[in-house]
Image (cartoon, rainbow, N blue to C red):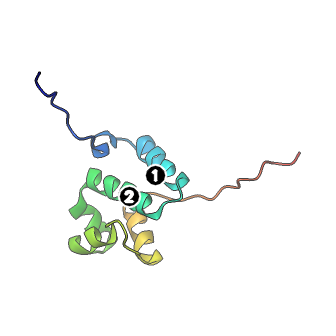
């Protein structure tokens, strides 16, 4: 039997609209895992072009890669610049049910 050719899943290939990007980042936020959120932001940055995102965020490309490395502990200011460069706005909502 021949082994099937299986390619690795790359979410970057599917992040081609604002709606998909929004859903992807929202799903990562729901997991409450900082490394997963950084990975999702990295995927969006790759989809948009790392060099352009780094420039738009005022970061060097190497700094951008370090910031998005799993286990890194980026400063809020850096993440805020990066999200702004990606045109992503985080919005807070309540987990409590509305009382009528």
Residue 72 percent coordinates (x, y): 37, 73
Kindly check if marks 1 and 2 are in contact, taking CB atoms under 8 A apart as contact: yes
Task: Determine whether, in the image, residue 78 is placed left or right of residue 93.
Answer: left
Task: Determine whether, in the image, residue 82 is placed left or right of residue 96.
Answer: left
The residues bearing labels 1 and 2 have C-alpha atoms spaced at a distance of: 7 Å
> Disc 1 designates what residue?
25
Q: Quadrant of the C terminus?
A: top right
- Identify the residue at horizontal 26%, vertical 75% (top origin): 63
- Identify the residue at horizontal 36%, vertical 58% (top origin): 39
10 Å crowding of disc 1: few (<14), some (14-19), many (20+): many
Single out the residue that lies furthest toward the left. Answer: 2
Q: Which mark is residue 64?
A: none
Residue 29 percent coordinates (x, y): 51, 55
Quadrant in the picture for residue 59:
bottom left
Q: Nearer the viewer, residue 49 or 73?
A: 73
Task: Determine whether, in the image, residue 36 is placed left or right of residue 58.
Answer: right
Task: Determine whether, in the image, residue 82 is placed left or right of residue 13.
Answer: right
> Disc 2 designates what residue?
41
Q: Nearer the viewer, residue 12 or 34?
A: 34
- Identify the residue at horizontal 29%, vertical 46% (top origin): 12
């Amino acid at each position: 039997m021949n082994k099937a050719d299986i390619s690795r899943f790359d979410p970057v290939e599917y992040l081609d609209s604002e709606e998909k990007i929004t859903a992807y980042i929202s799903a990562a936020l729901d997991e409450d895992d900082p490394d997963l959120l950084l990975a999702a932001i990295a995927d969006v940055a790759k989809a948009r072009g790392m060099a352009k995102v780094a420039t738009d965020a005022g970061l060097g490309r190497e700094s951008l890669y370090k910031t998005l490395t799993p286990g890194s502990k980026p400063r809020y200011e850096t993440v805020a610049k990066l999200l702004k460069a990606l045109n992503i706005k985080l919005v807070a909502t309540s987990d409590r049910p509305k009382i009528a």
